[in-house]
């Protein structure tokens, strides 16, 4: 039985910052709930820098191809947390999957580079954009794997960000360089 994998790259958002009663931007962290069928992912919280909020996270949805035919869209709900509040609705974006799934099944692979999508507010007006990329590919044999699947309600599971992973890799490489450099210096002096 064949399956399909949809990778979603949640890049950033712009122009969605709330203002407080005095008209100044409130100190806020934002996160996104991504829904596809019965599956949900929750992004990490990200503070805004200037007018841009960055996540740079990848999420993977794996289903049988027969299931993909019934999945019509992905919903991205943007929520915020402020000092005394949690899970305030900011806006949402719905991306229809019909073309992505059809092309991906026909070709075996399709990639859509990150592009901006409008953020729809509760009153059906638009404010800001969220940038999202997609990659869909079919698998020869489907083994539905739960990779990085986190329910929105479960905030207890630790998760690492891409930035933290890169920083850890840099730290390891730096220590190896220092250690190897010291070891090589000592060996050169012993051989003389």
Image (spheres, rainbow, N blue to C red):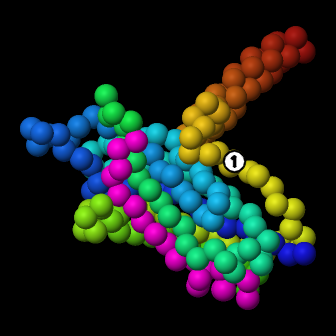
Please identify the quarter of the rendering in which residue 21 is found: top left
Where 25 sits versus 104, above or below?
Answer: above
Who is closer to the viewer here, 54 or 18?
18
**Can you tell which quarter of the image residue 48 is in?**
top left
Is 75 positioned to the left or the right of 14 in the image? right
Nearer to the camera, 155 or 23 = 155
Residue drawn at (23%, 37%) of the image: 26
Give the residue at x 35% y 58%.
91
Q: Residue 44 versus residue 190: which sits nearer the camera?
A: 44
Magenta-span inclusion, residue 98: yes
Vertical placement of 4 versus 40: above or below? below
Vertical side of 22 occupied by 141: above or below: below
Q: Is residue 133 magenta?
A: no
Where in the figure is residue 118, as x and y percent of width and height? 35, 68
Q: Position of residue 169 (x, y in %)?
A: 67, 35
Q: Quadrant location of the N terminus?
A: bottom right
The residue pinned by badge 1 equals 148
The structure residue drawn at horizontal position 87% and vertical position 62%, both measured from the top left corner, is 143
Residue at horizontal 9%, vertical 38%?
A: 22
In-front residue for pair 161/18? 18
Segment tinted magenta in the rendering:
87-106
Q: For residue 164, say whether it is visible.
A: no
Q: Quadrant of the C terminus?
A: top right
Kindly give the residue lying farthest to the top in the view shown. 190
* Circle 1 SS class: loop
């Amino acid at each position: 039985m064949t399956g399909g994998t949809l990778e979603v790259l949640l890049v950033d958002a712009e122009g969605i910052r709330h203002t407080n009663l005095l008209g100044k931007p409130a100190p806020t962290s934002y996160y996104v709930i991504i829904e596809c069928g019965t599956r949900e992912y929750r992004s990490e919280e990200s503070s805004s820098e200037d007018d841009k909020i960055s996540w740079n996270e990848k999420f993977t949805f794996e289903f049988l191809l027969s299931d993909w035919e019934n999945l019509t869209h992905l919903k991205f709900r943007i929520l915020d947390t402020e000092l005394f509040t949690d899970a305030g609705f900011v806006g949402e974006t719905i991306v229809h999957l019909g073309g992505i799934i059809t092309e991906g099944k026909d070709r075996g692979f399709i990639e859509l580079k990150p592009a901006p999508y409008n953020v729809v507010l509760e009153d059906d007006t638009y404010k800001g954009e969220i940038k999202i990329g997609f990659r869909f590919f079919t698998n020869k044999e489907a083994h539905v794997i739960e990779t990085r699947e986190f329910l929105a309600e479960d905030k207890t599971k630790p998760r690492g960000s891409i930035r933290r992973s890169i920083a850890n890799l840099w730290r390891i490489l730096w220590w190896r360089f220092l250690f190897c450099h010291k070891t090589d210096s000592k060996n050169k002096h012993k051989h003389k």
